[in-house]
Image: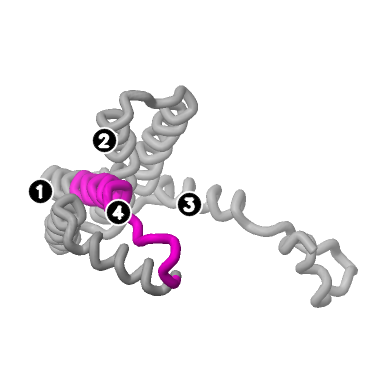
Amino acid sequence: MQWVVVSLSVGAAFAFSVSTTLKNASAGKVPLASADSPSGTRLWRFARDSLQHPLWLAGAVADVVGLALQVTALHLGALALVQPLLVTGLLFALALRHLQVRHIELRELCWAAVLTLCLIGLLTFSGSLSSSQHPSTADRLPAFIAALAGRPPMPERGRAQDAGSCSKFSGR
């Protein structure tokens, strides 16, 4: 049953990436209104023309398909498994972009590899792929480490915490 959920989630991610690619292509092909018309009118014409463009409409259909697959996956599986798998849509979008422009930069491939490894790590360490229904202490260890790594620094002992102490986080 878990492979059905994984397949539905990855299918939803693919449908969403197809939708984004089609809508992006549509936006590049819709003619812009003349520069002498007011900006509100230009925006209205662009939106109207986009809604009538075949690529944009195909993208909307792909959105509906992706949403149906995602809802079905969430109905059958756990949120902790379905939602992280939607990130694979970025990998699909990269592949679809390659089909359009025939060029992918090395840094994009490196980030795709990092994304893939992080997704594998997340699903492995979170216990989403385990067959056990009861998480063990070992399953909670990565979450504890991630919580410690992501926490803000503690104020120094003996120093009063005032409103100005947050300035180091806001960059002011």
Q: Nearer the viewer, residue 66 or 9?
A: 66
Asked whether, in this view, residue 57 is left or right of residue 98, the answer is left
Asked whether, in this view, residue 36 is left or right of residue 18, the answer is right
The residue identified by callout 4 is 31
Q: Secondary structure at mark 1?
A: loop
Q: Position of residue 119 (x, y in %)?
A: 37, 40
The residue identified by callout 1 is 1
Q: Which residues are magenta?
A: 14-38
Is residue 71 visible in the rendered structure shown here?
yes
Question: Of circles 2 and 1, which is in front?
Answer: 2
Asked whether, in this view, residue 68 is left or right of residue 40, the answer is left
Question: Pointers 4 and 3 in contact (CB under 8 A)?
Answer: no
Name which residue type carries label 2: Leu
Q: Is residue 1 magenta?
A: no
Question: Residue at 30% of width from left, 54% of height from top?
Answer: 31
Q: CA distance from mark 3 to mark 1?
A: 26 Å
Is residue 76 visible in the rendered structure shown here?
no
The residue identified by callout 3 is 143
